[in-house]
Amino acid sequence: MGDIKGFIKTRREKSEYRTICERVKDYDPVFVLRPDYRSLEQASRCMDCGTPFCHWGCPVGNYIPEWNDLVFAGKWEKALELLEATNNLPEITGRVCPAPCEFACVLGVNDDPVTIRENELSVIEHAFQHGSVKARPPKTRTGKKVAVIGSGPAGLACAAQLNQAGHTVTVFERDDRIGGLMRYGIPDFKLEKQVLERRIKLWKEEGIGFKTGVNAGIDIPADKLVKEYDAVVLAGGSRVPRNLNVPGRELKGIYFALDYLKQSNRRVAGDAIAAADTIDAKGKKVVVIGGGDTGSDCMGTAHRQGASEVVQIELLPKPPERRPDGQPWPKYPVILKTSTSQEEGGDRKWSVSTKSFAGADGKVKKLNCVQVDAALKEIPGTDFVIEADLV
């Protein structure tokens, strides 16, 4: 590595975020891109590990120590080559990946791990800023046609790889815009959509075809797809929500998370939503059931819509703040995480089960809840109520 003592001389630097009072007023990105010189400093912390466990932790197999070393040396173009060798959407993973690589970082055994995800984002954003990311249409075509069903990250990455191999690829998407959950599941304050548009534009220039508003198998029969294309790739995501079958579920004001997030993203994009169909948290007491990333995204959206109160409840117990003994390095640990949305306000409750919803005039007004133990069994005498106008 360029600086074998970099991890000793330089401390891990936290990501920089816009102030809470500023960012909750809009849907612009919550984070601030790091200047190049900071990226060079943070990249110097990457050690010359005998066995780089970050490779083991990374689902896409990024060449992490290699491009960290190149960043430290200021060789941004070479770093980009290595990053693009394994990752079709580094500008997306650099923003929203949970970074299991960092929990597997060898430096993390007894120190703060390398800022791998943010270093990755620095490489790709530096490349876009300096015009290094260009459309590269394949030089030859195989004559084979492939249909990719679904335009989420899996479908788009698949389409990009097949196109580079010389096949003629068409991506079918049933929504009106390309991107799947990147488009309609992740709020703009975490992933601004111009980032997605920037990449789609490049893929169009490389020859990938996109057809939106087409429900493959229905609008275009499966047998027709099989007949017209040499291969069909099924890359559809999961749009079947998990319901909560408890009394009062039929009350108005209770929605599935993706319906709420999708509509919010459409509103941010400027789409007109009929007043009768609008899901708006303004001035309402909001309860989010589920403590994961999706629930966190709902919290952040509710904050920006002007909710009067936001409560997030989780069925499982509160995780420990430090890595538990049963989840040693380099495993991905279940520890307490606080997202930017949770930092913005609201109350988080753990070990809570919703027994029923209650309301008036057909609208939800409260949740009847109970505390549960680690085995998810109800604890007698712990029943309580949470008021809610929107769930």
Image (cartoon, rainbow, N blue to C red):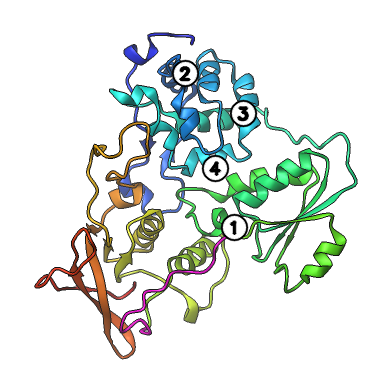
Residue 127 — which label? 3
Give the crowd class for mark 3: few <14, some 14-19, many >=20 residues within 10 Å: some
Image-based side of 127 in relation to 248, left or right:
right
- Residue 200 makes an appearance in the image: no
How many numbered circles does the render carry?
A: 4
Q: Residue at x 46, y 45 (%)?
A: 29
Sequence-first tag of 3 and 4:
4
Q: Is residue 358 above or below residue 332?
A: below
| Residue highlighted by disc 2 | 40
226 or 308, which is in the foreground? 226
Sequence-first tag of 2 and 3:
2
Sequence-first tag of 4 and 1:
4
Image-based side of 106 in relation to 232, left or right:
left
8 or 343, which is in the foreground? 8
Region in magenta? 237-251
Q: Label 4 sits on what residue type?
A: Ile
Queried whether the magenta region covers residue 240, the answer comes back as yes
Alpha carbon separation for disc pair 2 and 4: 21 Å
Give the crowd class for mark 4: few <14, some 14-19, many >=20 residues within 10 Å: many
Queried whether the magenta region covers residue 227, the answer comes back as no
Q: Residue furthest bottom?
A: 361
At which x and y percent is residue 349? 22, 59
- In this rendering, the label closer to the viewer, 3 or 1: 1
SS at badge 2: helix
Residue 92 — which label? 4
| Residue highlighted by disc 1 | 180
**Helix, strand or loop for the magenta stretch, by majority:** loop
312 or 30, which is in the foreground? 312
Q: Label 2 sits on what residue type?
A: Leu
